[in-house]
Image (tube, rainbow, N blue to C red):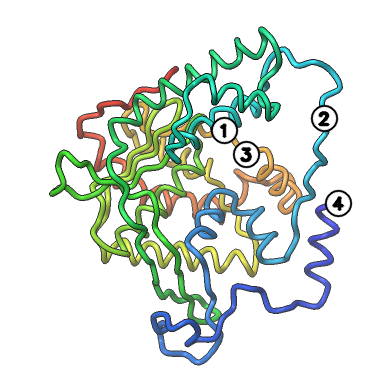
Amino acid sequence: PLWLQAARGLAGPRRPPPLLLGPEEEGGAPAPGGGAGPVVALELAELERFLRTPLAWALSRGLGVSRDEEPLLLPEHERFALNGLEAYRLRERLWRAFAEEQGLDEEALRARLAAEGLLPSGIAGERAWREEAGAWERLRRRLGRWWGEPLPPRRLDLPFATPGGPGRLSGWVEGLRRDPRDPAEPPRLLRVRVGDRRPQDLLALWAGLLAACAAGEPPQEARLVARDGDLRLAAPAPAEARERLAALAALAARALVRPLPLFPEAVVQALKRRRLPRGTLPKAEPSPGEAALAQRLWGAEAPEGVPEGLALAEELAEELAGALAGVAAAQPGGEQGDG
């Protein structure tokens, strides 16, 4: 069980985690303070994973505890409809084909997905295809307005400080696109989710936007195009972005030592008290996996009863409120989802 893995990880010999590098390794930026101790090295992708699932990430990276994956069970009966996860996977494959410009016509793509077992057979498969392909087409039409031309990834190398020593955040900022009709305008950080917007998507989008601002020309906005609507964030100034990104990286480094009661849903609830325009925020439904981990770590107090978690949520909400308000007065074009 998970609790036993965590206990063994805490009680057993602690090997140096893979996130520790020498201070001058890889020729990166010098660590803050010029200390000679090890550098806590974080990848941008890992920081976003931390913000999406803080507890699972802390147990995995900090203690080496991984949640056992359930074995894949083949269905013993004929499917006549897709469940929620199967429908999501089908839309995700349609999105991937679009993003990779595979050039397959609709019938060829449907046949391939059916051969892979993603569609039921017969009339049930045709009905499921019509429903999910239609949902994707509505999302694709909204996405087309913001798609533009892809820009090369930006290299990020940002030093930050932690109580235990210096740190370095590095990685590549991807998803920047520029409108070819107006090349003088700054690019846009664009992401896509074929399901509904979630609180963790908002936090990951914020980290990506901060990284884009810290690594080069600030984008005009960050936009997540999802099935039920868009999430939009205004870009802060580069100096402010670097400061806030360094603070997030330091928070992730703290979570490697001790899991933090940080919950994306609590951040959204704190934002809702700030009277932002309707439709600006995702639904604040708790993540089942994170809720289960929180219950094991903090018992009946989790998550609302943990004062530290509420304080963290308020701090992040204060940061995000300005970025959300910065785009609220802009022309919303394409904000509505499929309903």
Give coordinates of residue 334: x percent, y percent. Answer: 30, 26
Q: Name the residue under label 4.
A: 1
Mark 2 or mark 4, whichever is nearer to me? 2
Q: Where is 276 relative to 177, above or below?
A: above
Identify the mark nearer the N-term, 4 or 3: 4
Give coordinates of residue 3: x percent, y percent. Answer: 82, 55
The residue type indicated by label 3 comes to Ser
Between the C-alphas of marks 1 and 4, the distance is: 26 Å
Task: Name the residue nearer the viewer: 317 or 187.
Answer: 187
Is disc 1 surrounded by few (<14), some (14 to 19) or many (20+) residues within 10 Å? few
Task: Name the residue nearer the viewer: 235 or 270.
Answer: 235
The local secondary structure at tag 2 comes to: loop
Between the C-alphas of marks 1 and 3, the distance is: 7 Å
The residue type indicated by label 4 comes to Pro
Q: Mark 1 points at which residue?
A: 285
Is disc 2 surrounded by few (<14), some (14 to 19) or many (20+) residues within 10 Å? few
Q: Name the residue under label 2.
A: 74
The circle on residue 287 is 3
Q: Which residue is drawn at 69% across and 60% down?
A: 60
Identify the mark nearer the N-term, 1 or 4: 4
